[in-house]
Each structure stands twice: as structure tokens, then as C-alpha cells.
Image (cartoon, helix red, strand yellow):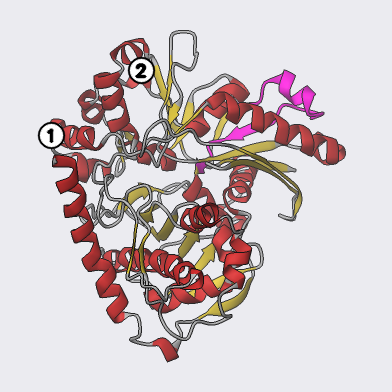
Amino acid sequence: MFVGIDLGTSAVKAVLVNGSQDVVGACSRALTISSPRDGWNEQDPGDWWTATLSALDALAAAHPREMADVRGIGLSGQQHGAVLLGDAGQVLRPCILWNDVRAAAESREFERRFPDSRQVCGNVAMPGFTAPKLLWVAHHEPEIFAATRHVLLPKAWLRYRLCGEMIEDMSDASGTLWLDVGRRCWSDAALEATGLARDAMPALVEGTARAGRVHPALARRWGMKDAPILAGGAGDNAAGAVGLGAVGAGSAFVSLGTSGVVWVTTDRFRPHPQGGIHAFCHAVPDMWHQMGVTLSAASSLAWWARTTGVAEADLLAELPERVTRPSPVIFLPYLSGERTPHNDGDIRGVFAGLSSGTTRADMTQAVLEGVAFSFRDVVDVLADAHSPLAQADVIGGGSRSRLWISIIATVTGVSLHRLAHGEQGGAFGAARLARLAVTGESVGSVCLPPQRVETVHPDPALSGAYDVPLARYRALYGGVRDAMRAGARS
């Protein structure tokens, strides 16, 4: 038996997986985000620990015999967050999250300090990454920075609580801007650019490697016969790829979660920082990936539901089963800034084209289409990066909506495969990594693709219908950006 734990932004999810790779138990505990200022997003790591304990306690209560036989635990986690620890391993401040955009100036400063960063680290410095966050802390909270002895990503901190060791895997470490992604080791030059040294960093392992063992007291708490081995694990998207079997070169998926991701696995390090494409290590040895990100995907629909006071399902129920024309309204889904292709933490969302005849259904459809347009931007940049897409699996909470998947397929021109278990995600991939760490089996024998239940192709009846709305969407970005900058100067 193996356990996978996914430390997400909105919840901690734990799954219990048997030797046949069936999920025999699952539990989720919700998390909340604190936003002390516009564009700032933080969480208390203590809440992660409380949620993790509660989830595993519930699994142990519901499945005591299976939990007794757990041999390994894998960890998946939200990327880029900065957990700062003091001399005694204590948390010094709330974790600054991946979707926090306060460090825009520090991103530019990091690249000035380390001019080779894009080729070494594989990415443009963006506010969401970890290194600019540390420069922000150094500038605005110097006493906290001076007291910082260790910097951990969210799942590495969770490992620290589980076993007392500071260890990180290559995929998650790639999102810090401190990793030499091609060589799969910490970059001293990148660390120096943020006033840090290697002794502040966790040890590095592959996601399939053994990386600690659960404290015996915790193993006893959950009724385990032996303290399970911890796997190196993965960043959330890499764990999702492992769960989907996207471990071979050219395999691809689209994640329609809180944020949106388009992923392509590569067999070598291929940086293409222009256009905001990320080049990271995969969680399996000797593999990498390219990835584009839109920061507000399913969270755009969640925001619209909160704003209208209508449940997401009810909003979607107001739309037809199949759209016959684009919405007359354009929505820019930049509620937390945008990563690919704009790398703009200051841009914000907009509805455009409203009239006295606009309906709530028009606006809901515009939200779905705005997210689809953001995916189209990512797909086009990936094509420029020599990773063109014709098909991909689709995962994430938004994948429950066939209508939304159809819109995305039509707008991007990519056929999307719906999966029998499209929402297992990072926790299931983490459990697979736990198995690999314990058994030493080959990646290919364990990381098999799930069953595809339907392929949603681009709608030929709407061929070309989105060309004008897409052009309007792209034109709006520049106007909104300039208007916001003018407002900031006034």
C-alpha cells in the first residue's frame, strides 16, 4: 500500500493506493488563502500540517488494515512558495504563495544581478518564483531575512514535519530560480544573487528516490506496522504528469485547475524563456518538460460564482450543451496577473463589450472563453518553442465541464482526451513515486496512462468563428496594461 499527499492551494488531499494502483481511500481537507493586499497571497504552513494530520487520521480511521500495510508515502505540492525557517526550524512568516505578485521589481533585480539566469534556470524571472520573493523579504522585512537560515518549498516543509529532514526533488526545485536545471543541481550564482548560500537549501534528490522515513510516532498514530519511506516526490504539475503517465518525450496534458497549465514532456533541457515558457526538470530521472501557465483558470469561474452569488454548476446550467457562437463579451482572466505569455503581475481582469442586452449567461460564457484564449496563447508559444500540440489529456476540476473542454479544444485547435480518473491528479502521482522509491521498479512499468473515455475534438462548425474574438482579446491586453500604468502614475 502507498499513500500520496498533495499539498494544494485550496486543499490537502491524501489518497491510499494498493498494489493494483486502485485508489482504495481518499480524503481532502480545505485550506484558505490570506490576501492582506491586492495581489498578495499567503498561507500559514501550520494550517497545512493540521490539514495533513486530519486527512491521514481520517484515512487511518476508515481503512485501518490498509494503512497498517503502507510502505511508502509520496508528496506533491504547490510550487514556488517560500517557507522561511529560523535557527530552530521555526516558521518566521506566512508562506508567500505561487500566485503572489508583489515581487515584480525584485524579479527584474534578480536578472540584473544574475544575467545568465534565463539560460541556467530555464525561465524568465517572475514574481511567482521563489528567488524574487526572498529579495522582496530582504528589502521590506530585513529582520526576517536576517533571521532566515533555511528556505523550503511547501512540500519540502511538509516532509520536514513528517521526518525531520530537509530534502527537495528536482521538479519542485526547478521553480525556485536557484536550480541549474540542465545540470540538476543548485546554482551558486543564482543563490548569491539573492544573498543566500547552499547551506540554506535542502538536499536534492530525484522524485523517485528515497528521501527520509516517517517519524515512528506518526507511524504509530496512523497504525502503520513500519515507518514508511518518503519519496522525493514532485511539484504539483510534475506529480500530475506522473499520475497521467506523461513520462515519455512528447506526452502532453492540459490542467484546468485553479491555475491553468499546458505541459509537454521533453527528453532534454530546452529553455525557451521568451513568451513565458517554463523549462523544468521532470520528477523522473533524465527527463524535463516545457510548460506554460495561466494564473487564473478554474479560479476565474469560481470568482464569477462568488461575485454573482450563484453556484458554478448553476451558472453552467444556464448555458447550452454546445455553444453555437462566441459570446459577444470578452473576458480577460488576469485576476492575479498573468504568467504566459505576458509575465505581467500588475495586469488585472476585464469584461469588455457589455451592452444593455448582455445577459449573465453571456458573461459566464465569456469567462469560459477568456480562459480558453489564455490557453491558446500558451499553445502558440509552445509551438514557437518547438513543441507543437495536436492532442493532450485534460485534467483538473474544470475538466468536469464538457462544454468548457469543447470550447478550449475549439479555440486552441487541440483535441483533448477526457479521462476515467481525470481528477486524481498530484496525490495519485505522488503515490506512484512512493511505490517507485520503495520497490525500485522501472518508471515505465508503473507510470501507465489512465483510460481515456472520450476525445473532444475542435468543433468544425465553429472553425474560424473565434478568430475575431481572439484578436480582440489580445488587443485588449495592451490597452488595459497601458491604462493601468497611466492610472498608477496619476
Residue 479 lies in what quarter of the image?
Answer: bottom left
Residue 227 lies in what quarter of the image?
Answer: top right
Report x, y in % for residue 239.
53, 49
Viewer-nearest residue: 164 or 465:
465
Residue that protrudes farthest toward the front in the picture = 356
425 drawn magenta = no
Viewer-nearest residue: 338 or 433:
338
SS class, disc 1: helix
Residue that protrudes farthest toward the top in the picture = 87
- Residue 63 is at least partly visible in this image: no
Viewer-nearest residue: 370 or 45:
370
Residue drawn at (54%, 74%), measured in percent from left and top?
403
Q: Which mark is residue 112?
A: 1
Q: Quadrant of the C terminus?
A: top left
- Residue 137 is at least partly visible in this image: yes
Highlighted magenta segment, given as a residue range: 212-234
SS class, disc 2: helix
Label 1: how many residues lie within 10 Å, few (<14), some (14-19) or many (20+)? few
Residue drawn at (58%, 58%), measured in percent from left and top?
397
The kind of residue on which mark 1 rests is: Arg
Going from N to C along the chain, the mark reached first, 1 or 2, is 1
Report x, y in % for residue 127.
29, 39
- Image position of 199 with respect to 97: above or below: above
Direction from residue 425 to residue 468 in the image, left or right: left
Label 2: how many residues lie within 10 Å, few (<14), some (14-19) or many (20+)? few
Real-space Cα separation, disc 1 to disc 2, in angstroms: 24 Å
Residue drawn at (44%, 57%), measured in percent from left and top?
260
Residue drawn at (65%, 32%), measured in percent from left and top?
51
- Image position of 452 with respect to 217: above or below: below
Q: Quadrant of the N terminus?
A: top right
Q: Which mark is residue 199?
A: 2
- Image position of 289 with respect to 454: above or below: above
